[in-house]
Image (cartoon, coloured by chain):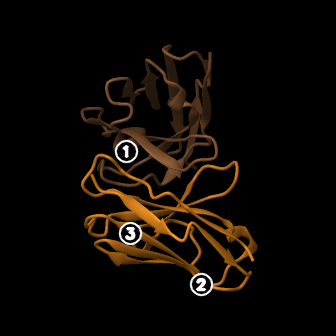
Chain colours: A orange, B brown
Amino acid sequence: EIAMTQSPATLSVSPGERATVSCRASQSVSMNLAWYQQKPGQAPRLLIYGASTRATGIPARFSGSGSGTEFTLTISSLQSEDFAVYYCQKYDNWPPFTFGPGTKVDIK
Amino acid sequence: QVHLVESGGGVVQPGRSLRLSCAVSGFTFSNHAMHWVRQAPGKGLEWVAVISYDGSNKYYAESVKGRFIISRDNSMNTLHLQMNSLRDEDAAVYYCARGGWSIATPGDYWGQGTLVTVSS
């Protein structure tokens, strides 16, 4: 079974700065990797699918890259509404559709 | 617009059963696979189950296999999760999420979740 890890667990960033979150798969998942944002008390929101394609309505400051086992979510200039927890999820070699443990992006 | 609304959560004793539902609107339900995902209090997301667009294929996480059953009624635009032999570790907010035509797609729209508490 493929395991998903994320780093760092917590990322402290100032508004306007760049944030980079990493996700690693224990085996290749090709480009079958999604990123979600979750704010407290809310459902997750799909940001990126296919490793690099922004979902409908997602601002261009969010970008995804990578393939195989190494992936990155970048937020180019953090806005106040971007402070949240970010999860990656693989949808290759399923089931299961495993999520990473999450990365909390908070205000520095 | 796309809407998913979960219901059926509540407090249940260990070993008992509960049935969750997810009512959808704003899209052609029968064209989409559907997922259940859960989140224990203060924890991360855990994928639970997925069902194909026509209900012919179903897959489960190992943690719920043999106890939970995912189903759908395309005539009623409703997804279900029958949860049997509930355990303390099943306590969580349960979300339904819309997949794509294929099962191998992420959830692009999510409901707000329904809380399941397992307690004696």
Label 1 crowding class (10 Å Cα cut-off): few <14, some 14-19, many 20+? some
B9 or B66, nearer to the observer: B66
Instruction: Please give the label number shown on residue B72.
Output: none
Q: In the rendered picture of this protein, how many numbered marks are placed on residues?
A: 3
Residue A2 visible in the picture: yes
Residue B91 on image: x %, y %: 56, 31
Residue B70 on image: x %, y %: 38, 29
Are the residues flagged by discs 3 and 2 from a single subunit?
A: yes
A33 or A24, nearer to the observer: A24
Vertical arrangement, residue A63 with respect to residue B94, above or below: below
Left or right of A71, for residue B1: right
Residue A65 on image: x %, y %: 41, 79
Taking the spot 58% from the left edge, 47% from the top edge, the residue there is B43
Q: Badge 2 sits on which subunit?
A: A
Vertical arrangement, residue A40 with respect to residue A103, above or below: above
| Quadrant, the C terminus of chain B | top right
Q: Nearer the viewer, mark 1 or mark 3?
A: 3
Helix, strand or loop under label 2: loop
Q: Earlier in the sequence, mark 3 or mark 2?
A: 3
Taking the spot 45% from the left edge, 23% from the top edge, the residue there is B83
Taking the spot 54% from the left edge, 50% from the top edge, the residue there is B44
Inspect the image, locate mark 2, and give the three-letter code of the amino acid beneath it. Ser
Left or right of B63, for residue B3: right
Instruction: Please give the label number shown on residue B32.
Output: 1
Q: Are the residues tagged 1 and 3 within 8 Å (C-beta)?
A: no
Residue B66 on image: x %, y %: 32, 24
Label 1 vs label 2: CA separation? 33 Å
Instruction: Please give the label number shown on residue A76.
Output: 2
Inspect the image, locate mark 1, and give the three-letter code of the amino acid beneath it. His
In this figure, which residue is indicated by the disc labeled 3? A24
